[in-house]
């Protein structure tokens, strides 16, 4: 589960907790990946 990216996730005893820094990093990584993949397709 990717609860770290869901601001409403608050169940730490089950290992579910929002993490703003992790959410920002995962979003940046996804954007970078998609830019790379889509850039290759346009060649």
Image (cartoon, rainbow, N blue to C red):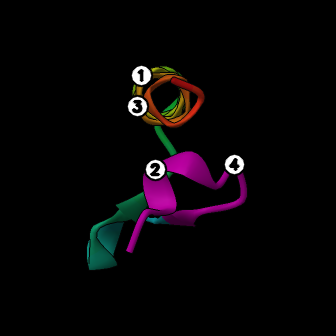
Crowding at mark 3 (Cα within 10 Å: few <14, some 14-19, many 20+): few
Q: Is residue 4 magenta?
A: yes
- Local secondary structure at mark 2: helix
Question: Circle 4 sits in a helix, a strand or a loop, which is it?
Answer: loop
Q: Which residue is mark 2?
A: 4
The numbered dot on residue 7 is 4
Question: Mark 4 or mark 3: which comes first in sequence?
Answer: 4
Quarter of the image where one finds residue 8: bottom right
Q: Residue at x 56, y 62 (%)?
A: 10
Closer to viewer: mark 3 or mark 1: 3
Q: Most prominent secondary structure in the magenta stretch?
A: loop
For the residues carrying marks 3 and 2, which lies nearer the camera in this image? Answer: 3
Which residue bears the numbered disc 3? Answer: 33
Q: Which residue is mark 1?
A: 25
* Residue 27 at x, y percent in the picture: 54, 31
Task: Write the residue at 55% across / 48% down.
Answer: 5
Residue located at (40% from left, 26% from top): 29
Q: From what the image shows, is residue 2 above or below residue 26?
A: below
Question: What stretch of residues is rendered in magenta?
Answer: 1-10
Q: Looking at the image, is mark 1 or mark 4 earlier in the sequence?
A: 4
Eye-nearest disc, 4 or 3? 3
């Amino acid at each position: 589960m990717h609860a770290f990216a869901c601001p409403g996730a608050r169940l730490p005893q089950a290992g579910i907790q929002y993490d703003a820094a992790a959410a920002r990093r995962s979003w940046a990584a996804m954007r970078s990946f998609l830019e790379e993949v889509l850039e290759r397709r346009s060649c």
